Image (cartoon, grey):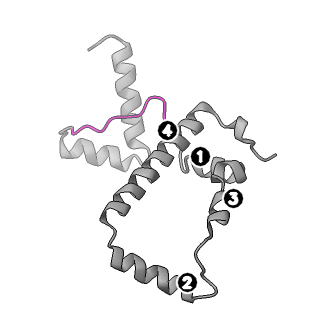
């Protein structure tokens, strides 16, 4: 079922507002640095190409934001791709260990870092630290 504009979550609506504000700021910056001569040349070239005519004021007035026209596409683009963030992410540390200890841990196979983490957790749970 396609997502209606009212069905966007508050987080999605906030992201839409953030992206819209960023796009407007970028457009303002581009307008400020636009070269009138270059702009006129582009406009003249567009007007001479029947396949790429500039939009009329009436056509521009009919335009609507994408989230109103195709909310399901916008909702899909707002979703994060890839692995979801962990609620308790691990932190990277640098730890100096003897070479023979590292060699033995690596020789134990894939997942040796997880096993070291589990052993340290059990050690802390015993209250040794």
Examine the rendered structure and indicate whether residue 118 appears above or below residue 4. above
Decide if residue 48 is on the left or right side of residue 128: right
Q: Is residue 87 magenta?
A: yes
Q: Which residue does the numbered mark 3 point to in the structure image?
A: 62
Q: Which residue does the numbered mark 1 point to in the structure image?
A: 79
What whole-number distance in Å separates the C-alpha atoms at marks 4 and 3? 40 Å
Of the residues under marks 4 and 3, which one precedes in the sequence? 3
On residue 47, the disc is 2
Compare residues 52 and 74 and report the one nearer the observer: 52
- Mark 2 crowdedness (10 Å alpha carbons): few <14, some 14-19, many ≥20: some
Query: In which quadrant will I find the C terminus?
Result: top left
Which stretch appears magenta?
86-94
What whole-number distance in Å separates the C-alpha atoms at marks 1 and 4? 12 Å
Residue at 50% over, 47% down: 20
Question: Element type at marker 2?
Answer: helix
Residue at 60% over, 31% down: 10
């Amino acid at each position: 079922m396609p997502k209606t504009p009212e069905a966007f979550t508050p987080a999605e609506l906030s992201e839409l507002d953030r992206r819209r504000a960023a796009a407007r700021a970028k457009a303002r910056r581009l307008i400020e640095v636009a070269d009138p001569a270059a702009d006129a040349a582009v406009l003249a070239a567009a007007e001479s190409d029947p396949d790429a005519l500039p939009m009329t004021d009436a056509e521009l007035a009919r335009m609507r934001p994408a989230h109103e026209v195709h909310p399901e596409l916008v909702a899909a683009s707002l979703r994060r791709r890839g692995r979801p963030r962990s609620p308790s992410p691990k932190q990277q540390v640098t730890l100096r260990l003897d070479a023979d200890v590292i060699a033995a841990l690596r020789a134990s196979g894939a997942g040796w870092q997880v096993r070291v983490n589990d052993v340290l957790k059990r050690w802390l749970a015993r209250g040794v630290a």
